[in-house]
Image (cartoon, rainbow, N blue to C red):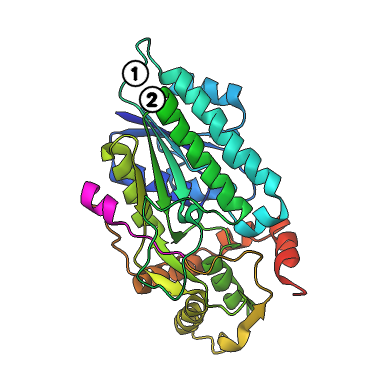
Amino acid sequence: MKKYLVTGGAGFIGSNFVLYMLNQHDDVSIVNVDSLTYAGNLENLKSVENDGRHRFVQADIRDADKIREIVDQFAPDYVINFAAESHVDRSILDPGAFASTNVMGTVALLNVVKAAWEQSDGSYGDHKYIQVSTDEVYGSLSLDEPNSFFRETTPLNPHSPYSSSKASADLFVKAYADTYGLPVNITRCSNNYGPYQFPEKLIPLMINNALVHKALPVYGDGLNVRDWLYVEDHCKAIDLVASNGKVGEIYNVGGHNERPNIFIVKKIIEEVSAVTGDAEINEALISYVEDRKGHDRRYGIAPDKIKEDLGWEPETAFETGIVKTIQWYLANPEWVEHVTSGDYQNYYSKMYENK
């Protein structure tokens, strides 16, 4: 049985990965480590609470002693690091928190893993560390060059505190591979969407606001383009990279679903209105707000390498995935209510109101 240590496994992508792995594989066990900050939610894992293959431990990856204790006890074959502060807007408000978790947390985790896995001859046995990163480390593409894409060889050029922290973490992972021979892979994904996504992100924010007839805030002119990847497709890619990816390689994971933000918003209005039959959910709810500082214009990933090496390609068209996502949020109002209370309301007011 293969053993996985998943960090950040109560967050959006991490929890989806845990659920995917337990659903797809009988021969895996997972210890799930999450510090349960605002975006970590144990409700995401309700369906596996009684699954003996899954164990949850509340811990911060910066706490090296606690992580060492977990690694020594569980002896994982794979470490998949999802743990991160992950929203650009929040990084603009507090860059230091992103440097602390995303950079120093990754370094602490690497140190623990290296010490646990390194053998007397300098080898690491049948182990691997996977760093889950983002296409934002590459910077921005021009809207005038629609055939240009981020590739694994594209130079890193991050613009926000968030993407800078993720790029720094990637470079530390590479350094541990180059310097110490640690077996690693880095995956860099485009914008994920799907169930269990915290509603500060564009798609769940728009769904949630539309349902209660609240203004739909759109940054700038709304023409910034993102490549959208259904989260289950991303989970499949990470599973493949962990088991079959060539040690030391970087793999871009993209959805071939590039859309301007305003298209996404209008599509959500159309679908939510159709599903609910609510005529008050219409484009009059759109409210253009002051643009985000340093807002990258376009992201676009070329996932050619992961297709050629591992046979992966996205399976979920955006038009299919967005309907599945809307239906999930409509079917889970209690989850939405719980995560949009308290601190989230204060954050929302700071980011979008009076702009």
Label 1: which secondary element: loop
**Residue 286 vs residue 17, the one in the foreground:** 286
The amino acid type found where label 2 is placed reads Gly
In this rendering, which labeled residue sits more in front, label 2 or label 1? 2
The residue most toward the right is 354
Quarter in which the N terminus is drawn:
top left
User: Which image quadrant: the C terminus?
Assistant: bottom right
Q: Is residue 249 above or below residue 63?
A: below
CA separation in Å, label 2 and label 1: 7 Å
Query: Relative to 97, is 278 on the left or the right?
Result: left
Q: Tell me which amino acid carries mark 1.
A: Ser
Look at mark 2 in the image and give the residue it sits on. 181
**Residue 307 location in percent, x, y?**
24, 53
Q: Earlier in the sequence, mark 2 or mark 1?
A: 1
| Residue 200: percent from left, percent from top | 61, 62
**Dot 2: within a 10 Å radius of its alpha carbon, few (fewer than 14), some, or many (20 or more) residues?**
some
Q: Residue at x 56, y 78 (%)?
A: 222
Instruction: Looking at the picture, tell me which residue is in the foreground, 330 or 190.
Output: 190
Above or below 95: residue 57: above
Residue at the spot x=58%, y=76% of the render?
211
Q: Give the residues drawn in magenta, as a range.
A: 299-310
The tag on residue 123 is 1
